[in-house]
Amino acid sequence: MSVVDEIFLRTHRGLGTPIALQGLWRTADRVDPELLRRVHAALRVGPLGRRVIRPRVPGARRSWRPNTRAHPLEFTEGTIADADLLTWADQQGADLDPEYGPGWRLSAAALDDGGSIVALTCSHVLADGRALVLAVDDALGGTGLTAPTARPTRSFAKSTASSAVTSTARESDRSDSARAPARMDQAAEVRAPTSDWSDAWRQWSIVVHGSFRALRRGIPERPTRAVSTRERGVSTSGHGRTETPSVILQCPAADWESAAAAQGGTANSLFIALIAKMLWASGFPGVTIDASLPVDTRDDPRVDNDLAMTEITIDRADTPATIREKSRIAYERRMSGPGGMPEELLQVLPDRWAYALAKGAGERDILCSNIGTLPDSLRALGPHRCTGVAARAIHPGLTADHLPRTRLSGYLCRIADTYTLAIVSLDPDRIDSPETLRNLVHATTTALWLPITLW
């Protein structure tokens, strides 16, 4: 397992903000149950069909073992109203266990408009946002996948991908290419260890030598700390469950890109500007907004957590054009390890120590995750045309004491000629309901001349 895998495993155990990823498909008609059974069977033996195994030697990394156990395909009885669609989807993240039980679930429900909603929900331990797309594409007979291989961790940015870093970035602001090339020393694959003993030797060697080099440069600075629930002024008290209102909107790609170009930006920088403006419209008092930006670092189509994090600071005078330039520069760097120490340190320390060391280091005021263009295989489920496809993160069982610094999370993807944006609020004081969030969406998209349709 990588550093980021283990970070998300700790959040699953209550050390941090719980995160699950979710793909949603809306169809124009009722989906054939037999078709979904075949998709479920393909997912069960696919790359999501695995679980975490603990090492028997201190310092060795946890590893993966195939696991064909799966939650049964779930069909909700009766129909649900359009207004309750996301409430239903939020409930699909319960009982996911990447270590001792199935870490994913496929579920479906009939909508009262005559269509269906299908949800694939998985623990972030198993996959990031792009990986979830690849797993579905594979189950639907799309692009072939590269088998998971033991690889060096790329950046502490992976392990600090908090609050739904669920996703990957399509770096249209960095260059014309879809993503940044990984450094050669980071991208090189390594031979899988033959035993826990050899892996523990490797890990401890990296930690000892890396720590020595870091200390020769002086005592490392303390990592950036997340603002606590009390400090950020959240009035929600106790440990009760906290709701995370969400909306999903669609916009014709031509209109989205035209609006971006008119302001000197790109589809991606317009997305970041939209989330920032929405946070300010909610009453956020900061003069500036810090945005965390996930970056896809995979070299091959692989189902794992293969992402890094970078960040930009946005002020009220920024436009999609200036955000484009800030993002271009940011994509050339990554957030570094804990205080300059080797990131493998987080894998040899006890979980609670590792959590304390890395706590909140990747959290910023907003998260803007651009998942990119989805494969054509996701445009339909068999003969059933999809009227909408979305990807997002949800937070099963989130309580007030585990609220992150992040106030708003956005997940953008494109399929065919449509951009779809899922927005999740993690600020219960200022955005306390789906209605409040929808009002913010309408006000902000109208100001940016974006014609949208809400799910």
Image (cartoon, rainbow, N blue to C red):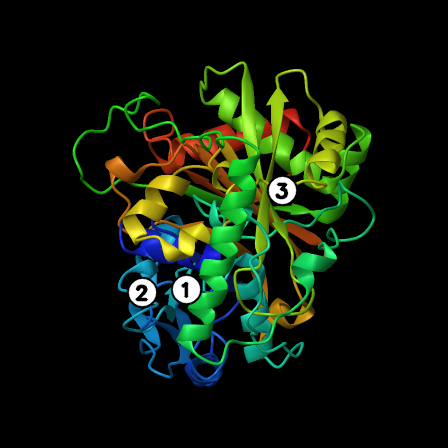
Residue 15 drawn above or below residue 22: above
Residue occupying image coordinates x 44% and y 51% = 345
Q: In the structure shown, which secondary structural element does the residue marked by tag 1 occupy?
A: strand
Instruction: Tell me how far mark 3 sits from mark 1, CA to CA.
Output: 26 Å
Left or right: where does residue 112 sit relative to residue 156? left
As shown in the figure, which amino acid type bears the numbered disc 1? Cys
Q: Earlier in the sequence, mark 2 or mark 3?
A: 2
Q: Say if residue 17 shows up in the picture.
A: no
Instruction: Tell me how far mark 2 sits from mark 3, CA to CA.
Output: 30 Å
Q: Position of residue 97 (x, y in %)?
A: 30, 66
**Label 3 sits on residue:** 334
Q: In the structure shown, which secondary structural element does the residue marked by tag 3 occupy?
A: loop
Residue occupying image coordinates x 67% and y 15% = 317
Q: In the structure shown, which secondary structural element does the residue marked by tag 2 occupy?
A: loop
Q: Say if residue 198 shows up in the picture.
A: yes
| Location of residue 5 by image quarter | bottom left
As shown in the figure, which amino acid type bears the numbered disc 2? Leu
Residue occupying image coordinates x 49% and y 16% = 286
Q: Position of residue 383 (x, y in %)?
A: 59, 79
Residue occupying image coordinates x 81% and y 29% = 264
Residue in front for this viewpoint, 405 or 443: 405
**Label 2 sits on residue:** 96
Q: Nearer the viewer, mark 2 or mark 3?
A: 3
**Label 1 sits on residue:** 122
Residue 49 drawn above or below residue 120: below
Instruction: Tell me how far mark 2 sits from mark 1, CA to CA.
Output: 7 Å
How packed mark 3 is, by other alpha carbons closer than 10 Å (few <14, some 14-19, many 20 or more), is some
Q: Earlier in the sequence, mark 2 or mark 1?
A: 2
Tell me whether circle 2 and circle 1 mark residues in contact (CB < 8 Å): yes
Residue in front for this viewpoint, 277 or 189: 189
